[in-house]
Each structure stands twice: as C-alpha cells, then as structure tokens.
Image (cartoon, rainbow, N blue to C red):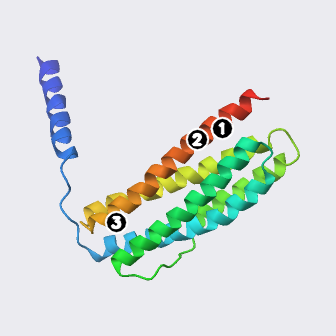
Amino acid sequence: MFMLIRFASVIGVFALIASNWSEKPQPVSNPESRKLFETELKDMYYVENRLVIKISELEELAMGEELKKGLQEHRQETLGHAKRLEDVFAVLGLKPEEHTCKGINGILDDGDEVVKEFTGTAGLDQAIITGARKAEHYEISSYMTLVALARQMDLDPKLEILLRENLQEERISDEKLAQLFDDTSAMR
C-alpha cells in the first residue's frame, strides 16, 4: 500500500511539473535580472568578437581542408552572431558594448596551450577541434541563459528570436565539429 501511495505521489509531482513546464513563467521585473541580462549580453558580444579573431588564427594553423573550410564558414557565422547581438542592443535602446569575459578567455588560453603542444603533429586538427568545441559549449550555455532571462523578464519577443537563432547555430556548429573530430580520427 505504501508503495502505491508513494508511486501515486511521484506521478502527481511529474504531472505538476509537466503542466507548468510549457506555461510561460510570470514576468520577473527586478533590476538585478535586467542587470544580469545586460552583463551577459555584453559578455557574449565580447565572446563573438574575440572568436572571430581566434577562428582566423586557427584557420591558418589547421592542416585538413575540411577543417579549414569549416572554420572559414564558422567565422562568417560568428560575424553574423555579433551582428544579431548588435540588433539585440538596438531593440533594448543600448549602444553595443563589450564586457571582458574571463570565462572565454580561459577557454581560449587553454586551447592555445593544447594547440601549441600538438603543432607539427598529426593530432593538431583534433586539438583545434577540441578547443573549438569547448568554446561552442560555453556559447550554448550563455545563449540558453540569455533566452531564459529574456523570457522571464517578458522582454520584446524579437530579442528571444534573435538569441535563439544564435543558440541554434551554435548547436549546429558543435554537431559539425563533433563530426569533423570523428572524421579526423578515422583518417589516422
């Protein structure tokens, strides 16, 4: 009997979670949320602009043609991400501004060390991809946070659309990098 009651209460909790999951949360209107959103937005503007430079450097180092081509395409996409963020700033009535992001700087510094260690070896392209995927995951997490904050604060729906576009492209880029990693592994 106890197990049946316990099972029923677990089912009830899942039903409650599921019913609330699809509902839009009540708007949050506190200055801290807005400040966090703007800080994260400035961080991501810094990240995208920094990555344009880093991807250019990696294009020159990459050995495989597929990786070089993929990096060139992603650099163009990253320029588009920065432009979309400028559009987000505009919708908010703010001037585009960067905030130094220590998180991405650490990821890029770590990637530089790994690439340096594998320069001149058959493992270089995999080292480049490893660092690139770490950066992608950082971006994915950051865009997920920005989308959630925009929704919670009930900001202009255009913001969520712009941020979701960047998020989706980052996810696709990560999938492409994973495939490139597998392909370079198979070539060894």
Q: Position of residue 159 (x, y in %)?
A: 34, 66
Q: Position of residue 23 (x, y in %)?
A: 18, 49
What's the residue at 52%, 70% (across, down)?
Answer: 45
Question: Which dot marks residue 159?
Answer: 3
Q: Is residue 39 visible?
A: no
Q: Mark 1 — residue? A: 180
The kind of residue on which mark 3 rests is Leu
Element marked by disc 1: helix
What's the residue at 60%, 38% (across, down)?
Answer: 178
What's the residue at 71%, 45% (across, down)?
Answer: 67
Residue 83 shown left or right of residue 88 in the figure: right
Quadrant including the C terminus: top right
Decide: is 93 above or below 61: below
The kind of residue on which mark 1 rests is Leu
The CA distance from mark 1 to mark 3 is 32 Å
Q: Position of residue 138 (x, y in %)?
A: 53, 54
| Residue 91, quarter of the rendered image | bottom left
Q: Mark 2 — residue? A: 176
Q: Say whether marks 2 and 1 touch (CB < 8 Å).
A: yes
